[in-house]
Image: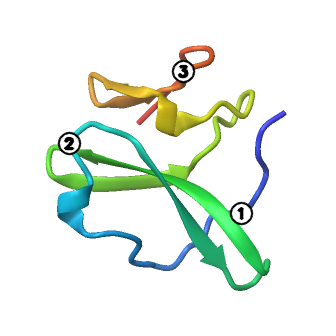
Amino acid sequence: HADRSPEPRDFTPVLRLDELKEDRPRRVAVRDAEAGREVGIVLVRHRGQVHAMGARCSHLGGPLDQGWVLEGRLVCPWHGSRYD
């Protein structure tokens, strides 16, 4: 069920740091030149550091940008899986 699209491995600027609120997940799209399409990425700023991962939960494909941060972990809104 999960999104199997490859995440880009190189740094790609997508927004200014001040646009990313602390502990508020945000989805962005990044152009993957190899695949020739856009890939959804979720960003989370936690304790001043920015973390990035695929925008879909690896279990059932839930939209992680609609989740929340609990004890430093991103929680899937569909079934509660936690990512750190």
* 10 Å crowding of disc 1: few (<14), some (14-19), many (20+): few
For the residues carrying marks 1 and 3, which lies nearer the camera in this image? Answer: 3
**Residue type, label 1:** Pro
Locate residue 25 relative to residue 32 in the image: left or right.
left
Residue 34 x, y percent position in the rendering = 75, 84
Residue 48's spot in the image, x, y percent? 15, 52
At mark 1, the secondary structure is: loop
Q: Is residue 58 left or right of residue 67?
A: right
Quarter placement of the C terminus = top left
Determine which residue is flagged by label 2.
22
Q: Position of residue 71 (x, y in %)?
A: 27, 22
Disc 3: which residue: 77
Query: Distance of mark 2 from mark 3, alpha carbons?
Result: 18 Å
- Is residue 26 placed above or below 64 in the rendered structure? below
Q: CA distance from mark 1 to mark 3?
A: 22 Å
Q: Spatial distance from mark 1 to mark 2, Cα to Cα?
A: 26 Å
Residue behind mark 1: 6
Q: Nearer the viewer, residue 9 or 29?
A: 29
Image depth: mark 1 or mark 2 in front: 2
